[in-house]
Amino acid sequence: MNIKPLSNHLFIESIEEEKKTQSGIVLPENVEKEKPVKGKIVAVGTGKINEKGERIPMSVKVGDMVLFKKYGPDEIEIEGKKYLVGDEDDILAILEF
Amino acid sequence: MNIKPLSNHLFIESIEEEKKTQSGIVLPENVEKEKPVKGKIVAVGTGKINEKGERIPMSVKVGDMVLFKKYGPDEIEIEGKKYLVGDEDDILAILEF
Amino acid sequence: MNIKPLSNHLFIESIEEEKKTQSGIVLPENVEKEKPVKGKIVAVGTGKINEKGERIPMSVKVGDMVLFKKYGPDEIEIEGKKYLVGDEDDILAILEF
Amino acid sequence: MNIKPLSNHLFIESIEEEKKTQSGIVLPENVEKEKPVKGKIVAVGTGKINEKGERIPMSVKVGDMVLFKKYGPDEIEIEGKKYLVGDEDDILAILEF
Amino acid sequence: MNIKPLSNHLFIESIEEEKKTQSGIVLPENVEKEKPVKGKIVAVGTGKINEKGERIPMSVKVGDMVLFKKYGPDEIEIEGKKYLVGDEDDILAILEF
Amino acid sequence: MNIKPLSNHLFIESIEEEKKTQSGIVLPENVEKEKPVKGKIVAVGTGKINEKGERIPMSVKVGDMVLFKKYGPDEIEIEGKKYLVGDEDDILAILEF
Amino acid sequence: MNIKPLSNHLFIESIEEEKKTQSGIVLPENVEKEKPVKGKIVAVGTGKINEKGERIPMSVKVGDMVLFKKYGPDEIEIEGKKYLVGDEDDILAILEF
């Protein structure tokens, strides 16, 4: 199955940061997790159409590591796999390594 | 009876995903269901009219399998059959198989 | 008395669907009714004026059977007769038989 | 005293419908009244100014019998007399007899 | 001290109507007062600037007796004197005597 | 330290009016104070940029005594000194003495 | 890792002011802190795209000391480090020393 987002929608696989204590100990999984803000773009739309009927190109692409608004994207489950789905406006920054 | 949506409205037949446990067992129907996000387009409008009086063509067509916003479309019952009715903006992505 | 709606307002006579049980038995009137979503257009405005001062023609006409948004039109009572009054935007689709 | 409304404001004298029971008996005044939706235009503004600085002519005139939005106009009392004051957008239809 | 309102702001001295009973008796001051809707314009701005950078002339002037929206203007106290301050949009009508 | 506001932001030093009783007695400081509405402009931005990319000049300048919306500007504390920070839209009038 | 903000987003390192009592005593850290309003810009986007498709240049740059709206930017934690992330609109003023 292939996901083809419309407009400026995009799908993100969230990456949950390991929670370490200040002394560096990795906390076990049942400790309360932060809502994720980091993820990998897995599908992007072709861009929103503006008032003049022109398509605005997207500023992110598949594979980009991004920071997104905590309460922007919604969770969606497709064939047992969880994604975050949002708009280009939900993306705060691209992370480069 | 034939449904002819106006503007950018569209009608969707929702497809409820089988809920499987992690070990692959299909859960019986009386288990609490997720609100559906997957469906088949069964009727589409001819497109919204913009400020200039031009009709914006729809980006989905009858028969398309789509993902839609969980709290976007509303339920409607016509002659005993349930549909979800929404706008083009409620459609997140087209699914291709 | 003649009702002449202004702008894109329209008046609808709602049609309440007979509620049948799955076995086909028609339920008596005192059973809780669904809010109607189906009706017949009985009066339409001449259309909204856009920013340029042009009148946008209406896409429905008197006599059309329509589906409308459940919580769109408001109830209004004129000379003892109940109508639903809404805008063109409240109409989801025209029904053809 | 003369009321000269500005912009697209208008003043309405509401007409309360006689409440009859189905058998035609007129109910006494202390029975709970419906909020009125019918009235006579007693004063109209010269029309709203649009973005281009042009005045949009009003579609109702003094003396018109109108239906208006139940929760649109506000009550106002001037020299002991009650009026409803609203905008052209609050008028749903003109009634012709 | 001179008040020079900016944009389309204006200052109003409210006039509280004498509350009379139906038999014409003027009620004493400690009886619950209605929020005022009538007043005299005491200061007006030079007008709002529109999107094109043009100043829109005001439709009221100092000295005009006006009716205003009950919940539009805010109370403000300057050097022990109470005013109502609002925008041109809060003015419903000019009263002529 | 120098405060250079961006866009149409401005910083105000509020002036709290002395509260006098009707007989002219100045009330001591621990009596409940009114939220201030009068102040002196201490810093102004260079003006907002409109849709066309043009800067709209500010209508107030440093040193102006102004009346502002009671619930418009926010309190901000910089190096132990309290300011009110708002936009040009929060300014109701310039006071001239 | 490098943060490249999109549009008019920016990342801020907040600077918490030392809380002194009026007599000049610095309060210990466990005393309730004010929400910060002062910070250093650590990353800026390339600017928002307007309706015409033109990029609006940013009015702040990396290294600028700024005052920002108390409830504007959101907290975000990236690799154990806390930032405030907001838009250009959240910046009230640049501080020059």
Image (cartoon, coloured by chain):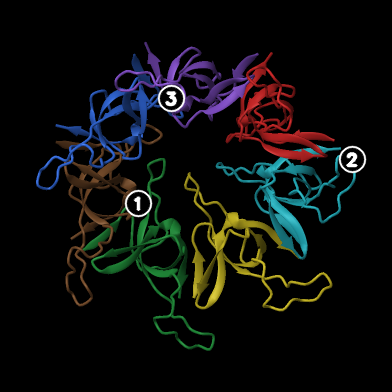
Chain colours: A blue, B purple, C red, D cyan, E yellow, F green, G brown
The kind of residue tagged 1 is: Ser
Q: Residue lying furthest left in this view?
A: A23
Which residue in the protein does label 1 denote? F7
In this picture, is E19 found above or below B87?
Answer: below
The kind of residue tagged 2 is: Ser
Going 25% across and 42% down the picture, which residue do you hit?
Answer: A32
Residues marked 2 and 3, same chain: no
- The local crowd at label 1, few if under 14, some if 14 to 19, many if 20 or more residues have their Cα within 10 Å, is many
The quadrant of the rendering that contains the C terminus of chain D is top right
The answer to which of B91 and G93 lies nearer the viewer is B91
In this picture, is D84 found above or below E31?
Answer: above
Whole-percent x, y for residue C94 in the image: 65, 20
- Mark 1 residue element: loop
The quadrant of the rendering that contains the N terminus of chain D is bottom right
Which residue in the protein does label 2 denote? D23
Going 61% across and 45% down the picture, which residue do you hit?
Answer: D49
- Mark 3 residue element: loop
Q: Disc 2 is attached to a residue of which chain?
A: D
